[in-house]
Amino acid sequence: MNLPGLYIHIPFCKTKCPYCHFYSTTDLTSMDAVIASLVREMELYEGEFDTFDTIYIGGGTPSLLTVQQLDVILSGIHKHFLVPPDAEITIEVNPADGDLAWYRSLKDLGVNRLHLGVQSFSDQALTFLGRRHRADDAFAAIVNTVRAGFDNFGLDLIYGIPGQDLQSWRKSLECAVSLSPPHLSAYQLAIEEETPLCHSYRRGSFDIPDEDASLAFFLETSAYLERSGYHHYEVSNYAASTSRKSRHNQKYWDYTPYLGIGPGAHSFKEGKRWWNHRSIEGYLKDLGLGTTPVAGDETLSRDELRLETLFMSLRTARGIDLAAFRLQFGEDLPKERHSIIHSLVASGFIVVNDERISPTTRGFAVADQLALIF
Amino acid sequence: MTNMDYIRNFSIIAHIDHGKSTLADRLIQHTGGCDARNFQDQILDNMDIERERGITIKSQAISLPYTARDGKTYNLNLIDTPGHVDFSYEVSRSLASCEGVLLLIDAAQGVQAQTLANLYLAMEHDLEIIPVINKIDLPSADVERVIEQIDSELGLDTDTHLKCSAKEGTGIEDILEAIVQRIPPPSGTPEAPLSALIFDAQYDPFRGTVIHCRIMDGVVQSGDIIRFMYGGATYKVEEVGHFLLSRQKRERLSAGEVGYIIAGVKTISDVRTGDTITLENRPCDKPLPGFKEVKPVVFASIYPIASDDYEDLAVSLEKYKLNDASFVYEKDASVALGQGFRCGFLGLLHLDIVQERLEREYDQSLILSVPSVRFRLTLKDDTILYVDNPSHYPPQMDIAKGEEPYIRAAMMMPERYLGAVMKLCQEKRGMNSSLSYPGPGRAELIYEMPLSEVIYDFYDRFKSVSQGYGSFDYELIDFRDSNLVLVDILVNGEKVDALSQIVHRDRARACGLQSCERLKEEIPKQMFKIALQAAIGGEIIARTTITAFRKDVTAKCYGGDISRKRKLLEKQKKGKKRMKMIGNVSIPQSAFLAVLKSDTD
């Protein structure tokens, strides 16, 4: 079994991006209290988890934190858990934040992977997305990343933004590739419920690409990045080499346990999933009382676990591990679902060998539906 | 012995929604048939569906004790009638049990097609007619115009009319007085041999069938051996009585009275509306006139969504049938949908009601095939075949002649909608039209047209082109020659037999295309392209395609997204489970329903 991963949620942002549905607040007054509580929460899990070989500090906007604040968190982790020297320690960075000195300090704190929320190299698109930074800031952030000595970092990009055509998206991609990031994430803009973006979409303020256009963006992204030497290893993720895949994210997809610390964070272990309060008050209150700030949990039934296993593994190029699936669910998919598998192979959605059922690029594009077929 | 002078038997007849049930409730309330505290609106419509739709489906009766201004107490027997064209025979039997009617007319809407149709029925039975203008409280009420219509369109004496607002409860006393004074008491000879007219029956799980009847001559009491003159069977009477709010046991029922008989009749199907009851040992000469075997005119198959539920469905149908003698069914099987039942209905409304009650009261999830009429086919070897089920349609080459049932449709509408309605009727193969103007600005249009066109989507479209101002009534007339073909629907090349239809050749292409288009709207996208085709034999007459999924994947899926995503997918998966698999294609129930729905917009 792989070692579990640790996720730390920093629920603070300077400004809210209209498309984002993750939990965060722009009221920064409780920042120190939350940071202290993060460490307290770690302490409560000391018996249940002991070693993490990936740590991911996300948000929110972790790059709002000072070096001292980050030090509190990282020292807390080291105090309560074991972290092997080769662990992957990632932090998400908003290109608007931090100067070279700050980047260097991250390195000194032991952070060895940065994830830069570039989103786009077009100022117009960045304005639509309500980002704080401009394209120039993104370039500067990457330069700082490299100058600070990070050889492992990734960029987030978003496509399907209103007004964006294939050509302008391709330009953003070219920009990204020219900077040789070891890892790229390319997400299609999703209209999430209850976000300001969703409200203005419902009002008809803008259009988003239809299914055909979405597919064209997706295929173009995959083809271009593959040609540029990236491996399309998950629906929205590309790595320059196997060692540059996000080791932390991989754990979500292959059911390795993970602990989520911070307001709104989710955890998973041995078929049980639990999640923290999505409010800073609730979070602080529970920890003040010395209890874990858990808002809810679920223990997955066989069918739930089966469905999750299918849709999560069909998001990755590796696909479904047939032996593991047989062992866990007692089903021999190629045998029992022979005819549908045959049709799916013939239509170019999946490839099958003795060990795995793996989605093709076309299969990635419809991965959610693929999962429902089995 | 009841003195017939103190009995009045009457019905309320009206166009749909003119306030029949509300008036009935007021009469009951006013005569103290029930105290205000227990007053549940529209007592006579005691099925949920009746109340929701405001339509009376079954006949019911109630006795109202009323002390008139002359100081004497009368027994007013109100016999409620079903309010829809599907049930016109039942209406006629109720009317045959009365001496008079209240002809209710909405003050805002005025005379409508069913007002006329009901008036004619009442006249056929030689009944005293009391026109009552209802809803005079409405701001849009135009009482003067309705009075004018009573004269010009109904040909009734305008002095005879009464005004009321059943909703507000005004004018009720005058109506009760008019019933006493103007409707003649029943005639009949108590000493004569028994003849009693059955106008309805209901099923009581403890007592069996409760027969509702009007005693024309003679007397019936418990212990008597009665015989149904058409049905032939004999039974021993267990109990007789009157209808108050519940059944009220009496020693005997005598000529002129309305009441019930319980006689150990096991199923309601053994009792036929319109049959005559007489005594086994002292029968009357001949049955009462007007009996008709009620025959279903619309047919459709029903299937359980999950084939495991077939037994459940069978039990539910059996139970349902106990209280609906006009509903008939037999076993049927579809290649696509598995085992089911072929059912016969009096009309589309009846079909709707049965479907809804099975789903609501018996918790069944159903798929209904496209409704069909019963066609008459003459084969080349001169055999005559009646076919209502497309799966029993013989090979086209064996058929010498096809015929389909025709109706005479009567429609009333403001003149300005005449053009649109005529266009619709012509589109529906209407012919031999005649037009009259019963009043200024109002047109009555008669068309002969195939019943199959009417059951499909005529009524909804008629309502829509006449913007709700048109009213409609019909009667079956005869079978007429028709160039019939069988249109099959193919999903990815596989025939879905439940979607086959027998139609006129001229309508085949349009009908096939419509089915394909509707399926296209309802069948969700799937992993593979789906071809939908309509065919006559091997000839494809219409086609359309449902494109496959091209992009359907969550962009981000990390720790916090997984449960949420799983729940969304579980929902989809559940939906898929409720679908029928035809080859590789999942077809939702809504697709089957959509094919038979109307296209009003």
Image (cartoon, grey):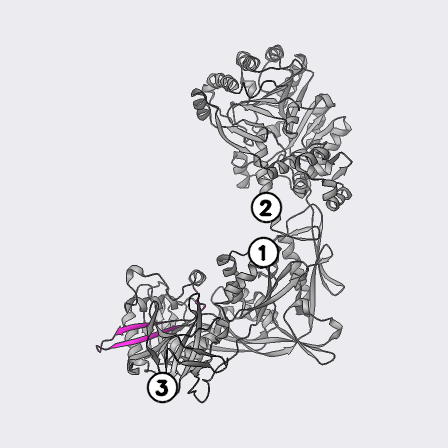
**Badge 1 is on which residue?**
B309
Evaluate whether residue B153 shows in this view.
Answer: no
Q: Secondary structure at mark 3?
A: loop
> Residue A239 or B90: which is nearer the viewer?
B90
Q: Quadrant of residue B507?
A: bottom right
- Inspect the image, locate mark 3, and give the three-letter code of the amino acid beneath it: Gly
**Real-space Cα separation, disc 2 to disc 3, in angstroms:** 64 Å
Residue placed at 48% from the left, 83% from the top? B229
**Badge 2 is on which residue?**
B574
Q: Chain of mark 2?
A: B
Left or right, residue B248 beside residue A338: left
B70, above or below A237, in the image: below
Are tags 2 and 3 found on a single chain?
Answer: yes
Left or right, residue B179 beside residue A149: left
Q: Earlier in the sequence, mark 2 or mark 3?
A: 3
Q: Is residue B289 rendered magenta in the image?
A: no
User: Which quarter shows the C terminus of chain B?
Assistant: bottom right
> Residue B586 or B194: which is nearer the viewer?
B194
B597, above or below A108, in the image: below
Q: Which mark is residue B188?
A: 3
